[in-house]
Amino acid sequence: MLSSGQGVTARRGQDGEERRARSRQGFGAQEFLDGSKYEGEFVNGLKHGKGRYTWKNEEFYEGSFYKDYRHGDGMYCWRTGNKFIGKFYLNWREGYGKHIFPDGATFKGLYHADQRFGPGVLSEPSGCQDIGLWHGKHLIQMCNSVQGSFSLKNLTEYAAYLEQTTVSGSQSQIEKDDNLLLYDDFTILPSGIENYSKDGDHLPLPSGIRRDLDQHFFGQLCEPDSQPYEGHKRDPLSTLPLPAKMLLHIHKHRRQAETLDWDVAEVLSLKKDGFSPKGPLEVASELLIQQASRGERQAVLNILLDGLVHPDVADSQGHTALIAAVVNCHDDVIHLLLDMGANIDKVNCEGLSALSVCHVLYYPCQPFYFLSGPRTQTQDLMSYCGKPLQTSPQDFTTDSSSQNSRPQTNSTVLTNWDLTSDHVGAAEALSHTGLPQHSDTQETVRRMAAMKFEHRVRLNTMKLLLDRGADPNASIVPLPVLFLAIMAADTETVRRLLLCGAQTNVCLSSEKTGLYPLHVAAALPGPEGPKITELVLHALADPDARACDQTEICEPSKVSTMARKSWSTSEKPFPEEGGRTALHVACQRETDHSNASKVVSLLLSHKARTDLLWSGHSPLSLAIASGNDMAVEALLKEGADPNLPLGCGVGNALCFITNFFYHLDGKRTKLLDILEKSGADMLNPVHVGDCKGNVVDYAHHSFDQDLRIAHTPFHILNMEERETFKARRHLLSKMGHLLRGAAVQREKEQLEKEKELRLNCETALSRTDADASHKTKPPTAVKQRSPSWKFCYHCGRSAAVKLTACTHCHSVFYCSSACKRKAWDERHREECLQESASVDSFERMFLFQNQQDPTTVLKSIEIPTYSNVQLKIVGTEENQPLSLNENYSYN
């Protein structure tokens, strides 16, 4: 033990040695207390440049140093005889290099953080080679395909919906902390940390230091602008999933790969044509997948216990042992693989996880037909969602020995067989006896029993995966699993997926119109529709989420489509117009109105907005167009505005009652009464072609679009067409009557307001005119009022017609002699006589009281305007030609 004085002396001597070491420059040598030795270049006392470092155990490194770190090209030799030749980054093997083993085997491949990470070739002394993608000591993806690998390509009905999903740098979203990125190096790390910290394996690096390190590491191959600023992270790729991390790392070192003596591109393409036969790792990996496919649990366990084969090893198609076990419903093997560390959410090259594979085999593909085109309609979605599960008879004649043949998976869907209930009950009983999964019998009942048995087994496998923590959001191919369950109207599976964290805010791609799960649920027919919609809403789905179909035009609204062609380019779209919401989808359903109205009520109870427009349509107008009077009543009860102005050329809710291109099954009159009682305004102006008119003009315009009904003589029409003609003419007559009544009522209200205002004014004047003489004065009168509305007093039209005033009272107008004759006979004869009589008596009384020249008096007289006034729309010209193309032969 040293005394205190000796300790002080030793410490001072050590400090002096450190000062001399820090001042060391150029080439030199240094021995350390642990027995290691360095010979090479120094800069400011740090190992910097070319040199050789030898450890006490005779391991040594010879190559490039950077500020005391092994950094750049170099060679490391272990005392066991292993040798690595390649690049180093802060003491770690990084980039492409070559590892030589004592037995003569070699590994050439890509490294990251001192481990194999990417493409590589392991060559054995025997001449065979293990080729593929590596992670650490394990081969994780081979360059050859295992026979019977699962693929959507093998299922012809799914092949059309296959999306090849590859992870690329542009597709991968690197999660960054934007707040940290705003700060500089000194805010992230203490100032000068690089001068006193030697723990580069654990501490983050300032951006300036990392740029210097990259420049020294890559040399002339450095791309300074290609790396994002990640100074606050030790490893810039640490937040990415493994496939994305590996692909970005490969891309980072792509220029170095061009200088190698082996074909990196061929390995990345997962081809083995130019290499030697399979090595022992590839053989063992293939055997693991095959044994898992057969359900050989003990064989799988023996392979994994050796520790050479990774449980997630995949073939060139991404087919893993877990997926192979899931395809064949070997639950015991699935448990074993997961217990041994298999990644339950790993996806294959097509982007399918084990859970999505199970769902694809469990559900049919029929519900996906509506996604086949670039532009889809809600009618297609409603036609195929919840469709009965079907399987073609030829599926059962195929050899069932193949792992991926359809008979192995066709029993995962229920079939609509044309059989008696007795047959279905023999089948149900046999399915509980544990019938083998692949039955060779051709009897229909036994085949049904086998299908039902495998159907239950597949369901148990799905439950197993979810219980073991499978992520329902890990795969979106061909669709997210939540979509598959909703489209199949499987209420219980939807409930289970939502409880396991299935996201309701994930939508399909824009090519598939960007639908959300709530859109699909709202389109489901049958009692499952409201149940699943309620489940999705309780999972906090946004009831106003909008699809990406804002450019679509609602069909078959051809009248509206024709009107849209004449829109002015200066007109701007309405601010609330966009894609469909779930409420639009539910209101657009043309069948199963009872369940559709329940879905509408559910959406409204979760505060779904009723004023959002799609293709110019509101949910109310779509409900009217589909003839769903229950949905119409539910919308109006929850405050939907019947007078909401819709998109240009679409009109308003009343217009859809008169759009004869929609078949409302005789509900037009009922719907008209519902809207009229809810406050729908018949006098609101709407677009009709290139001008503005009223809803009656829109109705006549719609009536004229059917050339057969509107422009064919009545006696030529068949009986069904005659009934259609009479029903439409009756509706037009009722619309005109309602318009007339609305105008009369509105005019009366205005007259009452003016009368009350005039009385108030007279009262105020009489109080100030107390001293005025009380001689007889002529009756007080105001100037004759201008008519507020101008329309045909019989049919109600105002646009594209020439209106002529009544020759007797000049208070009403007509669009044709036929309308004038009908109005005169039905109502205006008595009205006109009463009005003339009232005017005559008024004139006689006024002349008698004043005894003045009649000519002079009449010039100042005010004639009371008859309460039935006329509708005049801005833009209508008096001199427009008369349209007499209507079919009046019936009248």
Image (cartoon, rainbow, N blue to C red):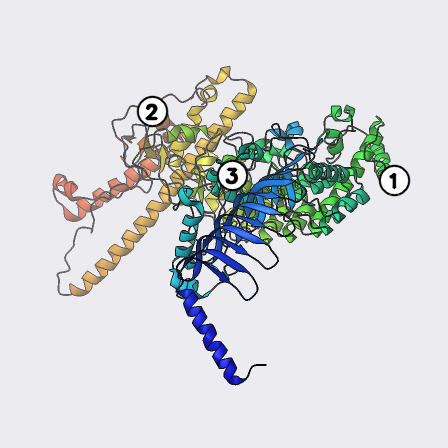
Considering depth in this image, is 238 or 489 the residue closer to the camera?
A: 238
Number of numbered discs on residues = 3
Distance from label 1 to label 2 (Cα)?
A: 84 Å
Identified at 51% across, 29% down, the residue is: 727
Amino acid type indicated by mark 1: Thr
Amino acid type indicated by mark 3: Ser
N-term-proximal mark, 1 vs 2? 1
Disc 2 crowd rating (10 Å Cα; few below 14, some 14-19, many 20+) is few
Under circle 3, the secondary element is: loop
Considering depth in this image, is 222 or 164 the residue closer to the camera?
A: 222
State the residue position of label 1: 433
Identified at 48% across, 21% down, the residue is: 709
Query: Which disc is residue 509 wearing?
Result: 3
Q: Where does the C terminus fall, quadrant-wise?
A: top left
Under circle 2, the secondary element is: helix
Q: Is residue 841 visible?
A: yes
